[in-house]
Amino acid sequence: MWRNRKLSCHVGTDAQLAKLVRKEFIRRHCRAACIPLRGSKPELESLEKEIIALAPPEMVSWNKTRKRVNQLPEPREMVDKILADLGFGTQEIAALERQARLFDLHGHMDLAH
């Protein structure tokens, strides 16, 4: 589901398929709630610090380093279900496998941005 448009080896059509799968994965499996908060910048920064203090260190290390160190393996069974539901054939799956290889080679560079 990974892509990085800034890589010299970027293949737009492969990346678009990865983006489509990622969007569908998020639609099916990710939920978030957004609540507008009122307050001054110092009040909101203080609240943010309190919330970050509640999380385990490995889940917030990105906040200090801007690097995502808590990488998780791709949930293959869930992704495979999405690919089947979207009717992806061998060409699309090959494109996604190329994207996965790019992540294996270059993904760590993208995580700092």
Image (cartoon, grey):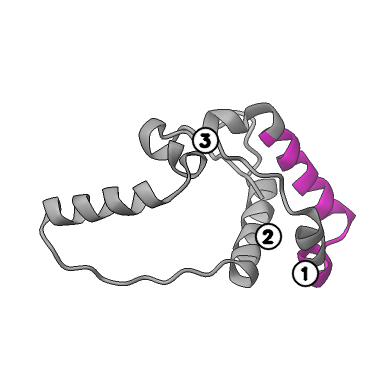
CB under 8 Å between discs 3 and 2:
no
List the residue tagged with mark 2.
21
30 in the magenta segment: no
**In what element is the residue under mark 1?**
loop
Q: Residue at x 63, y 28 (%)?
A: 106
From this view, report whether residue 70 is shown above or below residue 54: above
Q: Quadrant of residue 3?
A: top right
Res. 86 mark: 1
Report the residue at 67% width, 35% height from top: 103
Q: Earlier in the sequence, mark 2 or mark 1?
A: 2
Q: Are marks 2 and 1 in contact (CB under 8 Å)?
A: yes
Q: Nearer the viewer, residue 86 or 51?
A: 51
Q: At which x and y percent is residue 12?
A: 63, 45
Mark nearer the N terminus (3 vs 1)? 1
Residue type for callout 1: Leu
**Region of the chain picked out in magenta, as a range:** 82-103
Within 10 Å of disc 2 (Cα), the crowding (few <14, some 14-19, many 20+) is: many
Quote the CA–CA distance across marks 3 and 2: 19 Å
The quadrant of the picture occupied by the C terminus is top left
**Residue 52 image offset from top left, x and y in percent:** 36, 48
Q: Calculate the distance from the C-alpha at mark 2 to the C-alpha at mark 1.
A: 9 Å
Label ID, residue 16 = none
Q: Which residue position is annotated with label 3?
A: 111
